[in-house]
Image (cartoon, rainbow, N blue to C red):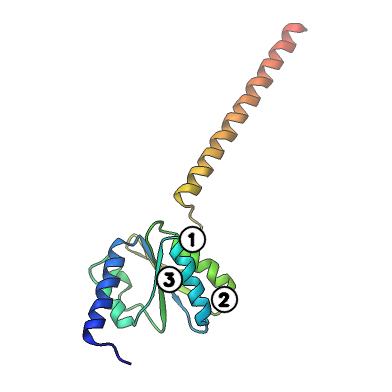
Amino acid sequence: MPLSLHNKKEIVSKIHHIANIALSIVIADSRGVTTNNITELRKLSRNIGVTISIVRNTLLNLAIQGTSFECLKNKFKGPTLVAYSLKHPGSGARLFKDFSKKNKNFKITGGVFEEKILSTLQVHHLADMPTYNEAIIIFISLIKEAAVGKLIRTVFAISNKKEKTLS
């Protein structure tokens, strides 16, 4: 059943709003992936601040006009699944990367971050980027390692000094 002009305008408006607040976009070809798997992907996306849409490419091209993702215009081919990362730039890429490992028919075709088109390899790098909380944990562990190392060196220096004074 074809969409009415009003419904098309509503879809374009909704996607345009999401694209204006998104940090990054990742696109994938979902041919051959079952509806149940797509539904599971949508459930996972809601938990991590990622909005997923499957929209006709012409409507998607209209929706991204005037956004930082306009560089994707006319890049959509075939059935396109789009993930908009709203909380962390790499969350959509991470979601798609993990999903593609389980579903061989699911192919990541590219993305956009900071108004630059990303290749599939770059999307995988974006997926590996730590979240804010992960970065804080890594930073704290590095500080702890440095503090423990300094403590060990200090104790070792004190013990060496005591051995020299006793001899």
Q: Which mark is residue 110?
A: 3
Q: Nearer the viewer, mark 3 or mark 1?
A: 1
Between 54 and 62, the one lying in front of the other is 54
Amino acid at the residue labelled 3 = Gly
Q: Nearer the viewer, mark 2 or mark 1?
A: 2
Q: Is residue 106 left or right of residue 115?
A: right
Return the residue at label 2: 103
Q: Residue at x 34, y 83 (%)?
A: 56
Q: Dot 1 surroundings within 10 Å: few (below 14), some, or many (20 or more)? A: many
Whichever of labels 2 and 3 marks the residue nearer the N terminus, that label is 2
Q: Which mark is residue 51?
A: none
Residue 1 position in % (x across, y down):
33, 92
Mark 2 near mark 3, Cβ–Cβ under 8 Å? no
Q: Nearer the viewer, mark 2 or mark 3?
A: 2
Return the residue at label 1: 127
Residue 156 position in % (x across, y down):
68, 21
Which quadrant does the C terminus fall into? top right
Residue 31 position in % (x across, y down):
49, 83
Between 58 and 165, the one lying in front of the other is 58
Whichever of labels 3 and 1 marks the residue nearer the N terminus, that label is 3
Q: In this view of the protein, can residue 88 be seen by the observer?
A: yes
How far apart, in angstroms, are the residues tagged by discs 2 and 3? 17 Å
Q: Secondary structure at mark 1?
A: helix
- The image shows residue 154, relative to residue 90, as above or below, that is above
Q: Secondary structure at mark 3?
A: strand
Q: Residue furthest right?
A: 167
- The image shows residue 165, relative to residue 99, as above or below, that is above
Q: In this view of the protein, can residue 106 be seen by the observer?
A: no
Q: Is residue 163 left or right of residue 45?
A: right
Figure quadrant of residue 48: bottom left
